[in-house]
């Protein structure tokens, strides 16, 4: 980009000037296509080249306003600093929208912490994007660093803001920390025949949601951290993937013939019981190919579970919170209920316990399991016991990777975590030598 901006300098060579002249001879449509491959801020900088270039960038089809980095380092009590950053962000967005001339946009993203004080501005942005026939729309008003405001003070997406020519062109809709009701969402979906992806996060206004209809194009649905949600009803013939993490709610699966991926977590997984959660699964158990569970090890409760046969399940990912006296062997029943399982991923987070127990032994052969990934490995009795079980019972095991860090810990950590990781790698090497898995074990 810096080379482009230097073209008008007297010091540039004749060859560079000829190159600039050649580019300048291209039609507007081609130049706009080139600019569309650049980040919006970089494309805007080309406006200094000439009068013609000043207008070209204003047809950029991807309007991405990601201001989340500017929130880093702002203490949650520094209200004046926060307000100053919010003022800058509003001016940035409004200036760009006032300059934009194209009739349609492909993508519109807002990523910055804003609350209901900015309701009017955000309403205008929503109207702008939908009026431009936006295809991918994201409104992410969340910030983990700004915690002094309660969620009920957030921006509310209302039905009167969405009075547009229908049908809408939406293919993807992402709303985070936006108060939006089930009624508004259902209305949006009924007028969005091309919508394939819907993600709702941290909405305090979402209580009941019903997604139904033969014309529903939705293939991916994600609902997380909606604290007041009570029910979800799905009659979605094209739905391929569902992620739900949050409160214990009623989920009714009316018709989901193509559902292949399921993620369940939060308090819903914590409080589910044998009489509630498990009866849901058999309705689509035979078609699931990937299952992700966010859970806490509870041996007493898990012994009551009678897992349905997940005959097509190829990938199983377990995000487990465990104490250092628990046994992960209670997970083997779920693995055993997945006869076609090919990949197992286990991520562990630990809490301290001073209870002691003996090492346990379980024998259940798994004939298709080939790849195992374990993150958060510390090399204690609990995770070593589970690794030994897999080495002895996964007949076709080709690779087991062990990582002392979880995904969130990647990139290092404090001295304690680094030392813990070093000790874990030493213990993993002990497993390698003791159980003869030299060629199968990968220690990260």
Image (tube, rainbow, N blue to C red):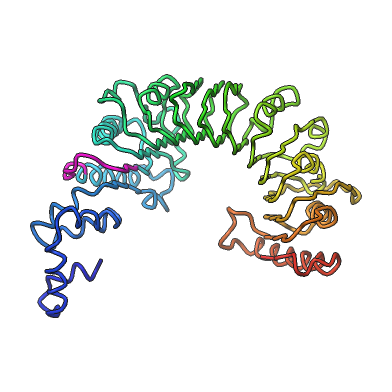
Q: Horizontally, is 164 left or right of 415 in the view?
A: left
Q: Horizontally, is 43 left or right of 432 in the view?
A: left
The foreground one among 401 and 87 is 401
In this view, the residue farthest toward the left is 51
Residue 190, by quadrant, is: top left
The foreground one among 38 and 240 is 240
Report the quarter where the C terminus lies: bottom right
Q: Position of residue 324 (x, y in %)?
A: 79, 49
Q: Residue at x 56, y 62 (%)?
A: 411
Q: How many marks?
A: 0
Q: Residue at x 64, y 37 (%)?
A: 288
Q: Position of residue 157 (x, y in %)?
A: 36, 27
Q: Horizontally, is 85 left or right of 385 in the view?
A: left
The foreground one among 105 and 351 is 105
- 438 magenta-colored: no
- 100 magenta-colored: yes
Q: Horizontally, is 360 left or right of 64 in the view?
A: right
Instruction: Find the magenta span and give its range.
Output: 97-109
Q: Position of residue 99 (x, y in %)?
A: 16, 45
């Amino acid at each position: 980009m810096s080379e482009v901006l230097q073209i008008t300098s007297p010091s540039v060579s004749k060859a560079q000037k000829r190159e600039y002249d050649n580019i300048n001879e291209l039609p507007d449509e081609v130049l706009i296509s080139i600019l569309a491959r650049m980040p919006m801020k970089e494309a805007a900088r080309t406006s200094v080249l000439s009068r013609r270039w000043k207008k070209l960038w204003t047809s950029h089809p991807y309007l991405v306003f990601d201001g989340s980095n500017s929130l880093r380092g702002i203490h949650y009590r520094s209200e004046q600093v926060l307000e100053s950053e919010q003022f800058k962000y509003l001016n940035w967005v409004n200036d760009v929208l006032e300059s934009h001339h194209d009739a349609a946009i492909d993508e519109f993203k807002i990523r910055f912490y804003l609350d209901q004080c900015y309701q009017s501005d955000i309403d205008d942005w929503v109207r702008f994007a939908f009026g431009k026939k936006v295809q991918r729309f994201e409104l992410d008003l969340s910030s983990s660093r700004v915690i002094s405001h309660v969620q009920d003070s957030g921006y509310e997406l209302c039905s009167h803001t969405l009075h547009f020519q229908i049908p809408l062109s939406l293919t993807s809709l992402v709303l985070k920390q936006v108060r939006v009701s089930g009624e508004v969402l259902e209305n949006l979906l009924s007028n969005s025949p091309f919508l394939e992806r819907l993600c709702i996060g941290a909405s305090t206004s979402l209580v009941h949601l019903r997604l139904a209809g033969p014309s529903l194009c939705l293939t991916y649905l994600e609902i997380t951290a909606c604290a007041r949600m009570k029910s979800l009803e799905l009659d979605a013939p094209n739905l391929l993937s569902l992620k739900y993490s949050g409160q214990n709610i009623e989920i009714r699966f009316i018709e989901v013939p193509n559902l292949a991926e399921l993620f369940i977590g939060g308090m819903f997984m914590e409080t589910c019981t044998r009489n509630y959660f498990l009866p849901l699964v058999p309705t689509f158990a035979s078609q699931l190919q990937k299952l992700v569970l966010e859970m806490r090890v509870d041996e007493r409760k898990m012994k009551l579970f009678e897992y349905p046969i997940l005959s097509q399940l190829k990938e199983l990912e377990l995000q487990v919170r465990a104490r250092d006296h628990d046994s992960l062997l209670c997970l083997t029943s779920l693995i055993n209920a997945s006869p076609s399982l090919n990949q197992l991923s286990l991520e562990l987070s630990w809490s301290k316990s001073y209870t002691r127990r003996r090492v346990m032994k379980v024998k259940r052969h798994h004939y298709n399991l080939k790849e195992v990934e374990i993150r958060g490995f510390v090399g204690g009795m609990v995770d070593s016991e589970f690794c030994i079980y897999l080495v002895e019972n996964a007949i076709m095991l080709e690779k087991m990777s062990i990582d002392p860090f979880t995904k969130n810990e990647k990139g290092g950590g404090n001295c304690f975590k680094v030392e813990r990781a070093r000790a874990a790698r030493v213990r993993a090497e002990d497993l390698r030598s003791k159980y003869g898995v030299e060629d199968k074990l990968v220690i990260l």
